Image (spheres, helix red, strand yellow):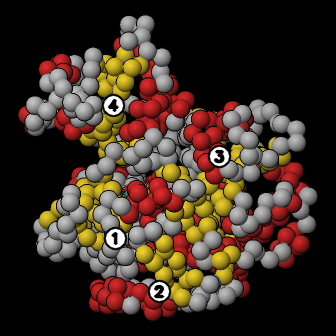
Amino acid sequence: MHNPSLITSIEARNQAYRESLENPEEFWGHVADQFTWKRKWDSVLDWNFEEPNVRWFDGAQLNITENCLDRHLPERGDEIALIWESNSPNEESKKYTYNELHEAVCVFAQVLRSGGIKKGDRVCIYMGMVPELAIAVLACARVGAIHSVIFGGFSAHSVADRVNDAQATAIITCDGAYRGAKDIPLKAIIDEALQHCNSVKTVWIYERTNIEIELKEGRDILWKQAIAHVNIQEAINTPAETMEAEDPLFILYTSGSTGKPKGVVHTCGGYMVWTHYTFTNAFQYQRGWVHFCTADIGWITGHSYILYGPLTAGATTLLFEGIPTYPNPDRFWEIVEKHNVDILYTAPTAIRSLMSAGNDWVMNHKMPSLKVLGTVGEPINEEAWQWYHKMVGKGNCEIVDTWWQTETGGVLISNLAAVTPSKPTFATLPLPGVEPLLVDENGNEIFGNNVSGNLCIRKPWPGILRTTWGDHERCKQTYFSTYPGLYFTGDGALRDENGNYRITGRVDDVLNVSGHRIGTAEVENAINLHTGVIESAIVGYPHDIKGQGIYAFVIYQGLETDLRTLSHQINETVSREIGAIAKADKIQIVSGLPKTRSGKIMRRILRKIAEGELESLGDTSTLLDPSMVDSIIQGRL
Ligand code: PRX
């Protein structure tokens, strides 16, 4: 399949960029022409950022899975769509051709239909990284159900919050999930979560680890029994549901500055066009390449660049169940060698952690197939960039530093591999359709180069979020009200003399720990539930491996006197409420928090203390009790 919108030179990139901004309708209409639509659009783009209301390809009808699967069958039905690599190097990998993946998706779609799942119903998916996860996601899209994948590391409490917010009627899960040496009891966590959810009627369970599970009569169905009843021919012949371009495709919950995660909504048409366009252009995907994105499908990176982007392009996508350091810190390199991976896409945290394991682990692997190395999720430091380039890529691979967010659906700022130049620690230039700008705190645009400010985007691109589930006002307030008329990313950035962007990190109360987004308010709420905790404040601090670590200042008046035990207990509470990813790295017990006279916690001061920048605490005279700062500094960890 020839991809007419693949950009192959700097000139073509500049031209595409210009055209995409001058005439977005014509530009994106042309790009969208490559896809299979059941009906073409009446208009390419209608939008305003006031409500906000963004509609791409309005009036068009499609099913995204026909673009991921069916349309590839005549030409590449026998080519590999999905390679699955187990947590254990000793277990055989599995491969699905496009024909096989198509069949598996059609079969599970039939299971969903016979379970009463209809277009628009919400289905939560809480599984390990097994092929059946990909199949479940695509089967939902096939029947028009809105999938909401919940990362397997979230606690029962977090699962329940998400299920209730989405009012999901069904759950697809596993008995357990292997992650390194662990077997995580997913089904037991679902059982606990569902004690607090009334909307769920059916739970399908794929058995992966054979950990003991309890089945609830009338609600729980084993995956293998369900598919055994499906007539395969009938399943394949049942048409995929007709979806409007602007019908929701999925909800994905992400953390913000308030305590409650929000359900970012992406729709069928624009998201498809955007993930495909960005996948093929940023990575410069070529037919026959194997693409290995190491993210979990529980996050947006997995949605866009394990599933939808690669599959709409007809690529071979690799799904890895395990973690980079198990059984040894060369698991990624082993997989790259074994499957002749062409594109490796991972997070700076993983790169730093593998770098700290020593060069021998990577030097033992030649990896001649590698062509493009991608990074995503957090700022990459120069040292990690260079190591990735020299040690992993042996100096021969392009590095693409892709900046984007759950809300953006796909990459917004990145170099295009071997087409536009890379610059270590810079995401570089915007993709066609993306018009970034920097503003100061009052919303005034900062012009010129060698400047920094808050990163906003001026116009909609096809993959922009449309709403936050059940609460459009929240979407408006969070993204479109800080700077009226602009989409506000929550990130700070600087622009160099050539217009390249470097993302410097969040400017709101959101932390980025190991590439995972964590809201400070969420963690504080969890810590405050611990018996004896009066109040707490969370800030981030630089962490060698995780990028940012979590530093908690806690006022405690309970009975526990041993600090280690107390810290452990507090983190257990965080684990129970949110999940282990949100555990604090440092917990300091304090007698009070620095507050203004109006009672607002001065986080800026706490951040400086956590970072160890004691010289630059700034003005503390507006504090209710300035001496509080000295006592916190004395107890600093
Ligand atoms: O702060 C930015 C950071 O990750 C945030 C988005 O997180 P999430 O929605 O979980 O999506 C992560 C995967 C797309 C951004 O606001 N971020 C993401 N990519 C980069 C980055 N920071 C610097 N450089 C990047 N390449």
Residue 88 visible: no
Dividing the image into four quarters, tell me where ligand 1 lies.
bottom left
Q: What is the distance, in whole Å, between disc 1 and disc 4 at their CAs?
A: 32 Å
Q: Which residue was labeled with disc 4?
A: 537
Horizontal placement of 119 versus 333: left or right? right
Q: What is the distance, in whole Å, between disc 1 and disc 3 at their CAs?
A: 32 Å
Q: Position of residue 70 (x, y in %)?
A: 71, 79
Using the rendered view, name the quadrant where residue 231 is placed.
Answer: bottom right
Residue at image coords 49%, 74%: 54
Q: What is the distance, in whole Å, between disc 4 and disc 3 at their CAs?
A: 28 Å
495 over 189 or under it: above or below: below
Q: Which mark is residue 28?
A: 2
Mark nearer the N terminus (1 vs 3)? 3
Residue 459 visible: yes
Query: Mark 2 packing: few (<14 Cα in 10 Å), some, or many (20+)?
Result: many
Give, as a three-letter code, the residue at label 2.
Trp
Give, as a three-letter code, the residue at label 1.
Gly
Q: Which mark is residue 485?
A: 1
367 over 260 or under it: above or below: below
Q: Which residue was labeled with disc 3?
A: 163
Residue at image coords 66%, 55%: 133
Q: What is the distance, in whole Å, between disc 2 and disc 1 at their CAs?
A: 22 Å
Q: Is mark 3 within 8 Å of ligand 1?
A: no
